[in-house]
Amino acid sequence: GNSVTQMEGPVTLSEEAFLTINCTYTATGYPSLFWYVQYPGEGLQLLLKATKADDKGSNKGFEATYRKETTSFHLEKGSVQVSDSAVYFCALSDAEGGSEKLVFGKGTKLTVNP
Amino acid sequence: DTEVTQTPKHLVMGMTNKKSLKCEQHMGHRAMYWYKQKAKKPPELMFVYSYEKLSINESVPSRFSPECPNSSLLNLHLHALQPEDSALYLCASSLLQGAGELFFGEGSRLTVL
C-alpha cells in the first residue's frame, strides 16, 4: 500500500539555522502531499500542501515541493525560530480501496534553541 | 468558526467503566474522523464518517463504538477498555472525505487504569 517515510529525529537546531526534514513516499497513483505540525500539548495543524507534481506549498516561511521523479516532499525553512519547535508529520492522501484517507509518516521532532 | 472542539480534555477510567468522548465542529464539514495517537507516534486512523455514515472502520476493537448523531457531532463510546488503550484521541473534520485538509481538535487524553 501507499506509505510515507520521514527522516528520523529528533532534530536540534540553533535559532536562524536552515531546516530540512526529508520525506519520501510510495504511491500507486497521484496522491496529494501534506505537512502537518503538532505543537506540544496540541492537535495537528496543516502547515502546507501540494496536490500535483512540481507544486510548491508554502506557509509561515516553510516550503516543500512535490517531486514526482524522486517521490519526495522535503520540508525546508531558511531561518528557524524557537517557536518552530514541534513535531512535523509528512502525509499523503491514500485513495486505495475507494475511500480516501491520510497516511502519516512517523513524525520528526524539531527543537530550536535560542 | 474554524475550530474542532473535543471534550473532555482529560479522562481517567477503570477497565469496567463506560465513558464517551465528544467532538463538535461548526464549519459545515461533512467528514469526521477519530484518530488514536500514542506517545511519540503518528496518529492512527480509527473511524471515518462521511455524511453521517460510517465510511471507514480500521478494524478497531468493539470496545470502541463511534456515533455520529448529526453533521456537527461525533462521539466515541468507550467500554471495557484495556490499559494499552491509554492514548491521545484526536477528532478531525474535513469539508468532504478525501478533501485533503483535516482540521484537528486538541484531543482527549485518556488514561485507563
Image (spheres, coloured by chain):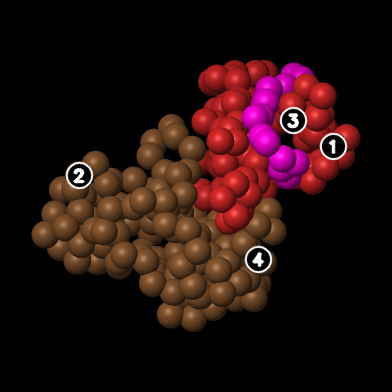
Label 4 lies in what chain? B
Location of residue B62 with respect to A63 vertically, above or below: below
What colour is chain B? brown
What colour is chain A? red
**Are the residues flagged by discs 3 and 1 from a single subunit?**
yes
Residue located beneath label 3 in the image: A73
Amino acid type of the residue tagged 1 in the rendering = Ala
Amino acid type of the residue tagged 4 in the rendering = Leu
Q: Secondary structure at mark 2?
A: helix
Amino acid type of the residue tagged 3 in the rendering = Phe
Q: From the image, which quarter does the N terminus of chain A lie in? A: top right
Residue located beneath label 1 in the image: A53
**Are the residues flagged by discs 2 and 1 from a single subunit?**
no
**Are the residues flagged by discs 3 and 4 from a single subunit?**
no
Which of A78 and B90 lies nearest the eye of the viewer? B90
Q: Quadrant of residue B8?
A: bottom left
Q: Return the x and y of residue B15 as percentages of the image width and height.
A: 14, 54
Q: Nearer the viewer, mark 3 or mark 2?
A: 3
Label 2 lies in what chain? B
> Callout 3 environment at 10 Å: few (<14), some (14 to 19), or many (20+)?
many
- Give the magenta part as a residue range: A16-34
B5 in magenta = no
Which of B79 and A25 lies nearest the eye of the viewer? A25
Q: Residue at x 60, y 36 (%)?
A: A2
Task: Give the numbered dot on residue B96.
Answer: 4
Which callout, 3 or 1, points at the residue further toward the start of the chain? 1
Residue located beneath label 2 in the image: B83
